[in-house]
Amino acid sequence: FFFVRPFHMPALCYKCQRSCFTCDIGTCTGCGGMTSSGALKLCDKCARDKNQCACCLGALDAVRPPEEKSTYIVQVNGAHYNDMEGEAAINAFQEDLVKWVSTTGHAVEVGMVLKIITGMTVACSESAAAALQEHPGVKNLEAD
């Protein structure tokens, strides 16, 4: 078998776009037609019609190239959490952060907890940091 990148890129998610595929013809599980590689489960038309990756069957519109991430230091606003301090304020903010991430769609990775400043480090894109700055539970956010 030869492994090559297809000349015509089939409908693939971001992860699968970086893969190489066998140079043979496969059968589409959607319509029974041909795929550009035996490793692909769907032909290009079926993948686009179903909005699924031709290889892993994941959603095409849910995956995109990740934004570059930077590390930021977040100081928690204890006043927003009924004047909580220290670890209690950090825990309350972390619960809020999980909800915030699920409602806004921003990706934020929590790093170290910094008890001295009642905060934590987070890794996220610049756009996520700008949005997070507006969260009422954030007292201060600055680049690390």
Image (cartoon, rainbow, N blue to C red):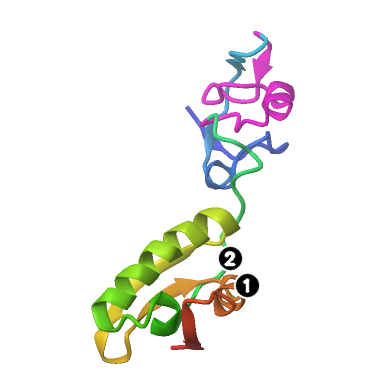
Residue at 37% across, 67% down: 94
Position of residue 3 in the picture relative to residue 98 (left or right): right
Three-letter residue code for mark 1: Ser
**Residue 132 placement: quadrant:** bottom right
Q: Magenta segment, which residues? A: 32-56
How far across and down, in percent of the image, does residue 48 sit?
72, 29
- Magenta residue check for 85: no
Residue 23 numbered tag: none
Picture layout, residue 129 above or below residue 29: below
Position of residue 107 in the picture relative to residue 53 (left or right): left
Residue in front for this viewpoint, 136 or 62: 136
- Label 2 element class: loop
Picture layout, residue 95 above or below residue 76: above
Residue 67 numbered tag: 2
- Magenta residue check for 41: yes
Three-letter residue code for mark 2: Glu
How far across and down, in percent of the image, does residue 127 sit?
63, 72
What residue is shown with label 1?
A: 127
Position of residue 27 in the picture relative to residue 3 (left or right): right
Residue at 58% across, 13% down: 29
The secondary structure that dominates the magenta segment is loop
Question: Do the residues under discs 2 and 1 have CB atoms within 8 angstroms?
Answer: yes
How far apart marks 2 and 1 lie (CA) works out to 9 Å
**Residue 116 placement: quadrant:** bottom left
